[in-house]
Amino acid sequence: MGVFGSWRTAFVVAGLGTIAAGLFAYWYIGDSPREQPSTNEAEALYIETEHAKEDQALATPAAGRTNLLGFLRFRSFWGMLLGWLGFDLVFYGLVAWAPNYLAQARHLSLAAIGGATFIIFGAGFVGEIVGGFLADHWKASGGSPNLVMRTVLGVSGVLTTLSTLLLAFVSSPVAAVALLSSTLFFLRWAGLYWSIPATLTDRGRAGVLGGMMNFAGNLGGIFVPIIIGVIVQATGSYFLALMFFTASGILYLVSSLVIDYSRKLPV
């Protein structure tokens, strides 16, 4: 946007990039480990053996277990749904309103907004990789699932919440961009949430559980732009909107801490 001076061109570039990524994924990713050229025989055999062990450990075959309502009885299930809801309230709220916030509250030019947006969401891209690396490295070093996940997601929730809270009290545009970058950097550690469905249930239903989690998050994604718009229009400022993001960060934090990452739910 800073180079071309046009939102329209920016959307075209983003759209073409997404199409290219989809075509690459279709070409590169196989339907099973054996279809992946980089997978050797030992790796494929290990995965198949572990899948067989998981299937044998189930009380009933995965394909026949359809009692999804049974998940509603468990705190971990609700923690997963509400945690992802809290994440999406912050993330999609910033996707929708960060450019307007930078223009109206921080008085940045169109070109400056383009550069700032790149920095902010680029920090989120880096943060997601860092969060995943930290969790994997700690687990590989012997950390227990609950200790690793609650600590990593807890740090993510605390620093996301703190960043949005401080954003309401700084006067410098540079500080505002830095805090928005901090928000996205730590918020995107929540990419770890996509490992939770497979943690809480068997392989045959992890996709369904992931869909339920994403449904809860996308409900927030649908309504949060409207909520923020109503708040800004009613109050004439972004202060309460930022407090809403702070409250959403707290929801993400608390929900992440109540999940038991050490066992599958007995459903």
Image: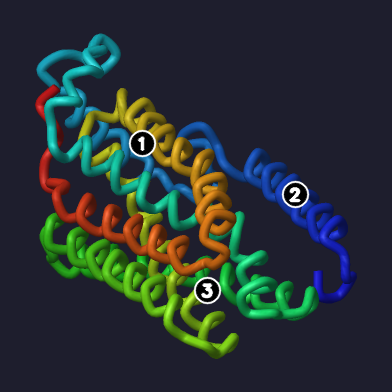
Q: Residue at x 31, y 34 (%)?
A: 48
SS for callout 3: helix
Identity of the amino acid at label 1?
Met
Res 213 label: 1
Which numbered disc, 2 or 3, marks the residue closer to the eye? 3
Furthest toward the top, the residue is 64
- Mark 3 — residue? 123
Q: Residue at x 42, y 41 (%)?
A: 217
Indicate left or right for 188 with 150 as reference: right
SS for callout 1: helix
Position in image of residue 19 (x %, y %):
74, 45
Question: Does label 1 or label 2 sit earlier along the sequence?
Answer: 2
Which quadrant is the C terminus positioned in? top left
Identity of the amino acid at label 3?
Ala
Q: Is residue 103 above or below residue 240?
A: below
- Mark 2 — residue? 20
Q: Residue at x 41, y 60 (%)?
A: 245
Which numbered disc, 1 or 2, marks the residue closer to the eye? 1
Estimate the spatial distance between the alpha carbons at disc 1 and disc 2, rounded to whole Å.
Answer: 27 Å
